[in-house]
Image (cartoon, rainbow, N blue to C red):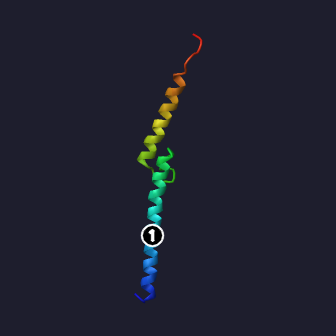
Amino acid sequence: MSDWQQWVVIALLLLCLARIGWGIYAFFRRARNKENPCNSCVSGCELKHLLDEKREKCKTEQKGTKKKCCG
């Protein structure tokens, strides 16, 4: 492995693996922090769509179920 091209290929592979690992870590970190893990998705994400629908549904339900303290 004294050829410089092999070292360049190994370095590129390690960089690719590090980038993939960072993406997976960031996805689960956002999910654990109760953020939308698909905020950075380029294309339409079904998970993002379902999460947005659920949030809208919860907002409308919360507005209609306000408790009255006197009455």
Q: What amino acid is found at the position of numbered circle 1 in the picture?
A: Cys
List x then y, in percent, for residue 6: 42, 84
The number of numbered discs placed on residues in the rendered structure image is: 1
Residue 42 seen in this snapshot: no
Q: Quadrant of the N terminus?
A: bottom left
User: In the picture shown, does residue 56 fall above or below 34?
Assistant: above
SS of the residue at dot 1?
helix
List x then y, in percent, for residue 19: 47, 65
Q: Pick out the residue farthest to the right.
A: 70
List x then y, in percent, for residue 41: 48, 54
Q: Pick out the residue farthest to the top.
A: 71
Q: What residue sits 44% from the left and 58% below the top?
A: 24
List x then y, in percent, for residue 51: 45, 41
User: In the picture shown, does residue 40 fall above or below 58?
Assistant: below
Q: What residue sits 43% from the left and 41% below the top?
A: 50
User: In the picture shown, does residue 19 fall above or below 40?
Assistant: below
User: Residue at label 1?
Assistant: 16
Q: What residue sits 46% from the left and 37% below the top?
A: 53
- 18 or 37, which is in the foreground? 18
Q: Pick out the residue farthest to the left.
A: 1
Residue 28 seen in this snapshot: yes
- 58 or 27, which is in the foreground? 27
User: Dot 1: few (<14), some (14–19), or many (≥20) neighbours within 10 Å?
Assistant: few
